[in-house]
Amino acid sequence: MAFRWKNDLTEKDITPKQLWLNRRQIIAAAGASFVGMPALAQSLEPNTLSDIRSYNNYYEFGTGKEDPAQNAHKLDASNWTIKVDGLVDNPGDYSLDDLLGGLTVEERIYRFRCVEAWSMVVPWNGVELADVLDRVGVKSSAKYVAFETVVQPDNMIGVQRRVIPFPYVEGLRLDEARHPLALLATGIYGEPMANQNGAPIRLVVPWKYGFKSIKSIVRITLTDKQPPATWNLINAREYGFYSNVNPNVSHPRWSQASERRIGGGLFASRQDTLMFNGYDEVASLYDGMNLAENF
Ligand code: MTE
């Protein structure tokens, strides 16, 4: 995948990696919370690129954790276009350059918590989703954003085997989508997004379970109705629309109170899962909502 930013020079290019990471961790930890900062800073030690690229969920390429790394080379991520439609001022088929060109590509080191109770820390490169929404012009009647993943049946063994219904779809409430933490990511560690991580562009919503972070997006629709979400369609009792990380609300089949950090080794102890995955600044989005009912 040859897509590169013109303005992709980052702090990382000019700062020794260790220094850069430490500074970034401190900034990110401070942003997340002032309480327990040393512990948080430690928990923001990013996973290696090899961890991030070899332990994946991308059912289009198979259901095993190693399947995407093995099969996703078949994804054709060239000449990518994203259809933007629904309640927008500027609908159309956008190239990545049209959609993202000139926007600020940032590095964000985020905790990433899968609903299956494993987690990683990933240094994403991406743009704020809010900036992209501004570019396409959201009509005042829009209340939600819907996303859809590409389907390339010839290239996707999981699609051929119909392991779940495709296309994979997801959605956010518009105020969630506009939160500055919500990213459209195009890279990791300054490298273009690997296919198995959702090349060329995927969503990252760090305060929600990982399945909300839909990969390889080809369609963004603004709508006034709550959009369908794949895991909620498959099993609404187990997977809600909101899917905010919440240690107090168990999955019907397992506890969500703790998590296993990938890369920690066989004997690493589990760590406590944090409300909103530690991103307390999103709490006001859910003021007055019962988060046990709206899980
Ligand atoms: N997006 C698509 N299109 N298909 C998927 O199977 N899996 C989700 C999410 N996005 C998935 C997807 C799940 S369950 C998780 S935990 C994350 O992607 C995993 O992202 P990663 O493999 O980059 O860690």
Image: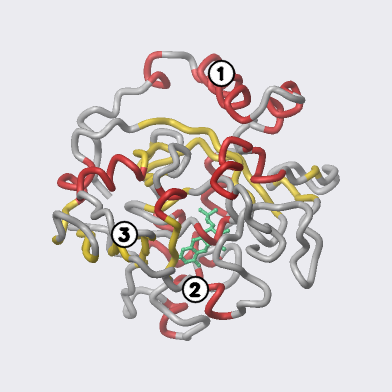
Mark closer to the observer (1, 3): 3
Quadrant holding the C terminus: bottom right
* Disc marking residue 142: 3
Side (left or right) of 229 relative to 247 = left
Residue 148: image quadrant is bottom left
Q: Tell me which amino acid carries mark 2.
A: Thr
In the rendered image, which residue does mark 2 sit on? Answer: 230
Q: Residues within 10 Å of mark 2 (few under 14, many from 20)?
A: many
Instruction: Tell us which disc is closer to us: 3 or 2.
Output: 3
Q: Position of residue 257 (x, y in %)?
A: 80, 52
Q: Are discs 3 and 2 less than 8 Å apart at CB?
A: no
Residue indicated by mark 1: 18
Image location (x, y in percent) of residue 277: 65, 44
Q: CA gap, disc 1 to disc 3?
A: 43 Å
Q: Amino acid at mark 1?
A: Gln
Query: Could you say whether the residue bearing mark 1 is in a helix, strand or loop?
Result: helix
Q: Which mark is residue 267?
A: none
Side (left or right) of 274 relative to 145: right
> Quick one: label 1 or label 2, which is nearer the N terminus?
1
Does residue 280 sit above or below 204 in this rendering? Answer: above
Mark earlier in primary sequence (1, 3): 1
